[in-house]
Image: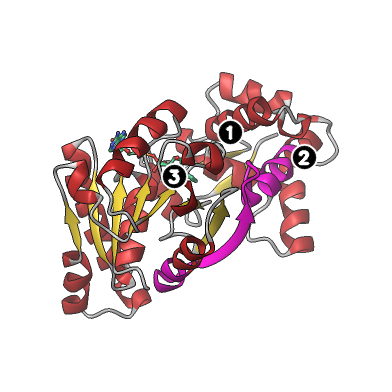
Amino acid sequence: MDVQSVGVIGAGFIGRGVAMAAALGGMRVLLYDIQEEVLERSLFHMGQRLAARSRHYGLTPGEMEEVLRRIRTVPRLESACDADLVLEAIPEDFEAKMALLRDVDRFAPPRAVLATTTSTFSVTELSGATSRPEWFLGLHFPQPPTSSRVVEVVRGYVTCEEAHELALRFCKRAGLTPIQTIDVPPFLVQRLLIPFIHEGIRALQEGVASASDIDEAMRLALQHPVGPLQLADRMGLDHVLATSEKLARETGDSRYLPPRLLRQMVRAGKLGRKSGEGFYVYDDVSTSAASAASDSMRVERRPLG
Ligand SMILES: NC(=O)c1ccc[n+]([C@@H]2O[C@H](COP(=O)([O-])OP(=O)(O)OC[C@H]3O[C@@H](n4cnc5c(N)ncnc54)[C@H](O)[C@@H]3O)[C@@H](O)[C@H]2O)c1
């Protein structure tokens, strides 16, 4: 069986990206958010994003309209659950996710695959909120799927083969490359990314090299598009710090303990691109996170110090 319809619960940063990717892949999307105005805003964003990237997607204006028509906003959770795959994309709050998943389990058809976008909680533990842990898995998007085409498909301890296969087919249809992982949070990308950023910050903190040399070394030596400090500035230093603290708390692993310099910079309000200054100073500051992400190559960057 293929996924024909997807219910997306939570129309924020990740939810609307998944909705758009699924609609571009020809699937019918039912999008629900507890805040009605978020639904309206999300539809608007998706329309703008599609229009801006129509050439990239190779779409005519008519086809674009068709993609948008596949996304239906619904006023009740119950309606969003009437799909082959139901994905929760609400904020990273364990109790809130458990409560929502209990309801999703009640409303979704018996053979629907249920999925979570969690980035830090155990998928197996979250599956305990449902009566069908075999039909539950994680779809972890390191970035919204409209920015990065990769998704980690996280198999819970008891996820069945059929549900796993269906999720893989969903990813392919949505134009995403699935990375198959087991349920050991933090998931693969964060596991590699956070220590990478931490070591870049520690090298700066210890005076090993300047910010621009640290970034240049990693860009040229490893052919990364950006170095660890540039990346942290893009992500937002407050976000990096919160993620590090959460991972250190959840795993008890010292690799995720944030460096002193990161904490000091966040306290000083130097949050990266969004605040105009982080490891670099940005002369062209946009306060909108969305446009900051897409404009990042146009700003003038000057390293500090
Ligand atoms: N933002 C990222 O870069 C990122 C990256 C990887 C994973 N994630 C994960 O994706 C999930 C969503 O993150 P986000 O950044 O999109 O959050 P967000 O805050 O942008 O959006 C969450 C949306 O969920 C809605 N919501 C809250 N409770 C709800 C409920 N009970 N029912 C319906 N809607 C509800 C909110 O109104 C909000 O619009 C989180 O688990 C997060 O850890 C986020």
For label 1, count other residues whose C-alpha is less than 10 Å away and answer few (under 14), some (14-19) or many (20+). many
Q: Quadrant of ligand 1?
A: top left
Magenta residues (range): 169-198
* Alpha-carbon span between mark 1 and mark 3: 27 Å
Callout 2 secondary element: helix
Between discs 2 and 1, the one toward the N terminus: 2
Question: What residue is shown with label 2?
Answer: 199
Q: Residue at x 70, y 26 (%)?
A: 261
* Alpha-carbon span between mark 2 and mark 3: 28 Å
For label 2, count other residues whose C-alpha is less than 10 Å away and answer few (under 14), some (14-19) or many (20+). some
Q: Do the residues bearing badges 2 and 3 touch, measured as CB atoms within 8 Å? A: no
The C terminus: image quadrant: top right
Say if disc 2 is inside 8 Å of ligand 1.
no
The N terminus: image quadrant: bottom left
Question: Foreground residue, 182 or 20?
Answer: 182
Q: Which mark is residue 177?
A: none
Looking at the image, residue 206 sits to the left or right of residue 127; the answer is: right
Please name the colour scheme applied to the rendered image. Answer: secondary structure
Question: What residue is shown with label 1?
Answer: 243
Callout 3 secondary element: loop
* Tally of numbered discs: 3
Q: Residue at x 40, y 42 (%)?
A: 131
**Which image quadrant for residue 21?**
bottom left
Question: What residue is shown with label 3?
Answer: 284
Q: Is residue 186 magenta?
A: yes
Q: Residue at x 78, y 34 (%)?
A: 202
Q: Give the foreground label among 2 and 1.
A: 1
